[in-house]
Image: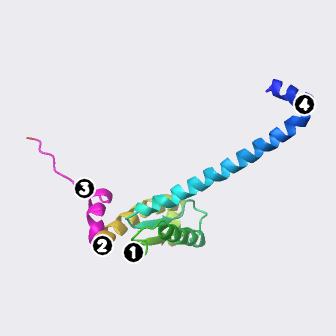
């Protein structure tokens, strides 16, 4: 690094164009990287087959932010070429602290996080009944837990 700084100080005429070229190359490669990452994220939606519950990620996210994220999910499902984009349920489930009682407000967020999991499971059960035939086996075997088997202790 020190040698480069010394070289840049002595040969500043060639250091400036080299720096500009380096910046342009970095800028172009960064744009390509972000484009690839965005394509990969949207492409991940191509194989989604289960119900999506869009929840609040923090206690400060209200219904408007959750609605925006749900709308983005719907757009991404469609843009990815998912055959079932218009059938897959995208359910908005924002955190609303005032539905909890006074005694529950201290742990309302924890209750809400548990309820999100329950809502997701219930949505999967309902979707498994209404899903197209070609998706049912994937939903039942991959997304819903297997029935509990009693262990044979003999």
Q: Nearer the viewer, mark 4 or mark 1?
A: 4
Find the magenta span and give its range: 130-153
Q: Point out the frontmost of discs 3 and 1.
A: 1
Q: Is residue 80 visible?
A: yes
In the rendered structure, which disc, 4 or 2, sits on the residue that comes first in sequence?
A: 4
Mark number, residue 11:
4
Residue annotated with mark 3: 146
Q: CA distance from mark 2 to mark 1?
A: 9 Å
Could you classify mark 2 by the number of other residues whose Cα lies within 10 Å: few (under 14), some (14-19), or many (20 or more)? some
Please rate how many residues cluster around mark 3, counting C-alpha atoms within 10 Å: few if below 14, some from 14 to 19, many from 20: few
Residue placed under numbered mark 1 in the picture: 87
Nearest the viewer among 101 and 111 is 111
Q: Give the number of callouts.
A: 4
Provide the secondary structure element on which disc 4 rests: loop
The numbered mark, 3 or 1, whose residue comes first in the sequence reads: 1
**Label 2 SS:** loop
- The Cα atoms of the two marked residues, 2 and 3, are separated by 21 Å
Q: Which residue occupies 30% across, 63% down?
A: 139
**Residue shown at the point (50%, 72%) measured from the top left:** 99
Residue that badge 2 annotates: 132
Is residue 145 in the magenta section?
A: yes
Label 2 near label 4: C-beta < 8 Å? no
Calculate the distance from the C-alpha at mark 4 to the C-alpha at mark 1: 64 Å
Q: Earlier in the sequence, mark 4 or mark 3?
A: 4
Q: Nearer the viewer, mark 2 or mark 3?
A: 2
């Amino acid at each position: 690094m020190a040698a480069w700084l010394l070289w840049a100080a002595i040969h500043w005429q060639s250091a400036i164009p080299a720096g500009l070229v380096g910046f342009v190359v970095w800028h172009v490669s960064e744009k390509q990287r972000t484009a690839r990452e965005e394509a990969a994220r949207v492409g991940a939606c191509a194989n989604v087959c289960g119900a999506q519950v869009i929840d609040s990620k923090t206690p400060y996210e209200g219904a408007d932010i959750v609605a925006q994220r749900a709308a983005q999910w719907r757009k991404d499902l469609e843009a990815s070429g998912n055959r079932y984009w218009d059938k897959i349920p995208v359910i908005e489930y924002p955190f609303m602290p005032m539905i909890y009682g006074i005694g529950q407000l201290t742990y309302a967020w924890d209750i809400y996080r548990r309820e999100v999991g329950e809502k997701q499971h219930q949505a999967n059960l309902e979707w498994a009944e209404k899903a197209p035939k070609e998706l049912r086996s994937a939903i039942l075997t991959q997304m819903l837990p297997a029935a509990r088997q009693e262990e044979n202790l003999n």
